[in-house]
Amino acid sequence: MASLKEVRNRIASVKSTQQITSAMKMVAASKLRKAQTGILTLRPYAQKQQLLLQKLSAGADVELPGGLSDKRETNRTLFVAFSSNRGLCGAFNSNVIKKTMNSVNEVNLLNKGSEAAIITIGRKATEFFERSELKPVASFDSVYDDLTVSNAADIADKLTEMFIQGKYDKIVLIYHQFKNAVVQKLITEQFLPVEPDSTDIKGNAVSDYIFEPSRDEILISLVPRILRTQLYKALLDSWASEQGARMTAMSQATDNASELLNELKLTYNKARQAAITNEILEIVSGAEALNKN
């Protein structure tokens, strides 16, 4: 059995860790409320944009600028991995990294002669892939320090430019979609080329509308805005998912610390009781020895 001093030191250490995890849980909960408000506010807007794109593109005979809707032979695929800048958020980062690696391997195995590249958003993914054979072609780790529409638009424009220049034939986003504080769904979402539906949600042909300016002009102007919103939504989803994952992980860590403290206190009390019993036995034995003398 461990000595009383060792058990006391372990209790003090666990209490200190519990205070840290509890504080991190509260900080994550505070950030989660803000992040959750942002993503839940943006989603209806993004959905309306997608619905408008469906209606405008139905039967439209127009080529988007830079061939953004062209279906090319997929020889070069770019994966954009969304991770976090900090750890202590459970399996959040490892799931993104594992999914990205599996996607890259799938492209290399299924499409012989094809190439896969990675762009990272978040230091954890950047640090991992910089140590691997597949180095990221670019990273945007600082975007989470100032998560704004304009910063997201800059990244979306750079990705769009890469596609227009023909550097990549397909761009895929890999990120966590925020459901709630406990559930975050890891998804892959095609960013480019644009694949608008030719029918509405019910599968019926879209009725004729009078457009001013023309439908094609509206469509050409709308698509870049939708791409920026799509990337901003992915960033907000990932940010909210990170805070939810961290809050859950720190809550579990705090609960585990409480259980460990109870066990250590029980161990301490048993050791203290054993020490007191030994002292009593020594005193009784000494008294009996004196009486015999």
Image (cartoon, rainbow, N blue to C red):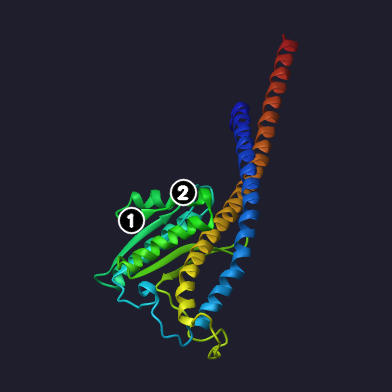
Please tell me how crowded label 2 is: few (under 14), some (14-19), or many (20+) other residues with Cα within 10 Å: few
Tell me, yes or no, if residue 181 can be seen here.
no
The quarter of the picture where the C terminus appears is top right
Tell me which label, 2 or 1, sits earlier in the chain: 1
Q: Position of residue 122 (x, y in %)?
A: 45, 52
Residue at 45 percent of width and 85 percent of height? 60
Q: Position of residue 136 (x, y in %)?
A: 34, 55
Label 2, label 1: how many angstroms apart (C-alpha)?
Answer: 16 Å
Compared across the picture, whether 117 is left or right of 22 comes to left
Q: Nearer the viewer, residue 87 or 139?
A: 139
Residue at 36 percent of width and 53 percent of height? 129
Q: Which mark identifies residue 142? A: 2
Q: Amino acid at mark 2?
A: Ser
The residue singled out by tag 1 in the image is 137
Q: Quadrant of residue 11?
A: top right
Residue at 56 percent of width and 84 percent of height? 201
Q: Nearer the viewer, residue 3 or 185?
A: 185
- Is disc 2 placed on a helix, strand or loop? helix
The quarter of the picture where the N terminus appears is top right
Please tell me how crowded label 1 is: few (under 14), some (14-19), or many (20+) other residues with Cα within 10 Å: few
- Is disc 1 placed on a helix, strand or loop? loop
> Relative to residue 17, is residue 36 depicted above or below?
below
Compared across the picture, whether 123 is left or right of 258 comes to left
